[in-house]
Image (tube, grey):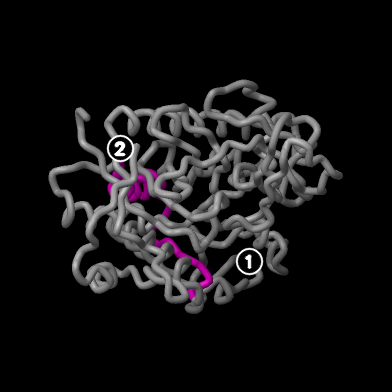
Amino acid sequence: MRRERIEPRAGWQHRVEAIGFGFHTLDGRPYWREDACYVFDESAIAMLETATAELHSLCLEAVDRIVRAGRYADLGLPDDAARLAERSWFDRDPSLYGRMDLSFDGRSPPKLFEYNADTPTSLFEASVVQWYWLEDVAPEADQFNSIHEKLIARWREIGGGPRVHFAACYDNPEDGTTTDYLLDTCVQAGYDVQPLDIEEIGWSGKAFIDLADRPIDRLFKLYPWEWLMSEPFATHIPHSGTRWLEPPWKMLLSNKAILPLLWEFFPGHPNLLPASRTRAHVDGPVVAKPYWGREGDGIVVLGVNERGEDKPLHVYQSLAPLPVFDGRHALVGSWVIGDEPAGIGIREDDDRITRNTSCFVPHRFRQGH
C-alpha cells in the first residue's frame, strides 16, 4: 500500500459534476482529491476482503448473543428500542449495506475502528466516482469495487413489494446524493421508487403514508435509528407494518458500545482492538468515543497516564494509529453489501481523527503485483 502523487484530470470538477457528484468541494477546499491515489498489491486487497468478511461474521454473531442474552443495557438502549431491535432480528429483517472503518497499512492485519452499519455515507464516491476516475486514468488497472453490481443484486434478493420509498434530509447534499444513488440502484433492480424528505412521512392512523396517501410498505431511510426513536411518531413504528432499511437490529451495530462486546466475545482477535466501557480496563493510550458520535465528533485521544473519570455513554478503545503517507492519515472504509465485502474507499486527513472534512482519495491495484 502506498500513496502516489499524480496529475489530476483536466477539468475534473466538470467531469465529476456530470455524473452527479456536486459536493466535490466543501467550503472552498476539495473533498474529492485526484492529485494522489492509493496503490495496493493484490495480496493487500485480499487481506482487506478477508478481514471485512470475518468482521461482519463476528458482528452478526455478536448481535445474536446480545439479543438472546438481553444485554441491551450494555448498549444504552431504552426498552422500546431494544424490543424493536429484538423483534427485527428474530424476524430476520434483511440489511442492505454498511461500512467498516479500518486501520490498515498494507501489511499488518486490518483493525476495526467502528462499524457504520445504519446510515453510512461516502458510498457514491466509493462506488461510482472513483470507478469513472479509474477508467480515465488507469484503465489497465483494477479496483476493489463491486459495490454497484452488488447493490442491484441485493435489492433483488430483498424483494418485498413493487414500490420502495426513500427518505432523507435532502437539504444535506451528501445525504441527498447518497440516497438518490441508492434509489437509482433500486430502479435498476426493477422497482418503482418514491423519494421523500424525512419530514414528509405521514401517519394515517393505521400506516405510514407518503404525500399521495399511499402506504409506505418498505422504507429506506438515511436517518439514524436513535433519531427516529426520539421522534413523536416513534410509538407507531412497531405497529405500522413498514419494513425498514436499515432494519432496527442495526441499532446494535451502529452503536460504538458494540466494540467492548466484540472484544469480550472474541478476545485477542487479530482484527479487533481491546475496548471497554471503563478506561482502566484498557492498557496504554486509548481513544474515547461516544456511543452515537458521528464524523469524529466527541472523539478524544488519551495518553498512557491520562485516566480521569469514565464518561457515561462512552467507550475506550485501544489506540491504533492510522498509517501516515506523505503526512496524511489514511482510513480505509470497507463496504459490505448484504453479507458480502464489496469494495473500499479511502479518506485522509492531516489530523489523526477522520472527520466530515477529511478528503476522499481514489485507489487502484494491479493483479499479480
* Extreme-right residue of the structure: 309
State the image quarter where residue 115 is shown: top right
Q: Which residues are magenta?
A: 144-170
* Extreme-left residue of the structure: 140
Q: Earlier in the sequence, mark 1 or mark 2?
A: 2
Q: Nearer the viewer, mark 1 or mark 2?
A: 2
The N terminus is located in which quarter? top left
Left or right: 39 as drawn, with respect to 245? left
Viewer-side residue, 259 vs 285: 285
Viewer-side residue, 89 vs 34: 34
Counting from the top left corner in percent of width and height, residue 37 is at: 30, 50
Q: Which residue is mark 1?
A: 206
Residue type at tag 1: Lys
Is residue 180 placed above or below 259 in the rendered structure? below
* Extreme-front residue of the structure: 327
Counting from the top left corner in percent of width and height, residue 310 is at: 83, 43
Viewer-side residue, 98 vs 209: 98
The C terminus is located in which quarter? top left
149 is within the stretch colored magenta: yes
Q: Which residue is mark 2?
A: 40
- Label 1 residue SS: loop
8 is within the stretch colored magenta: no
The CA distance from mark 1 to mark 2 is 53 Å
State the image quarter where residue 188 is shown: bottom left
Residue 67 shows in the view: no
Q: Residue at x 48, y 74 (%)?
A: 170
Q: Residue at x 56, y 39 (%)?
A: 321
Counting from the top left corner in percent of width and height, residue 207 is at: 60, 65
Left or right: 220 as drawn, with respect to 47? right
Residue type at tag 2: Phe
Q: Residue at x 58, y 30 (%)?
A: 272
Counting from the top left corner in percent of width and height, residue 33 is at: 34, 60
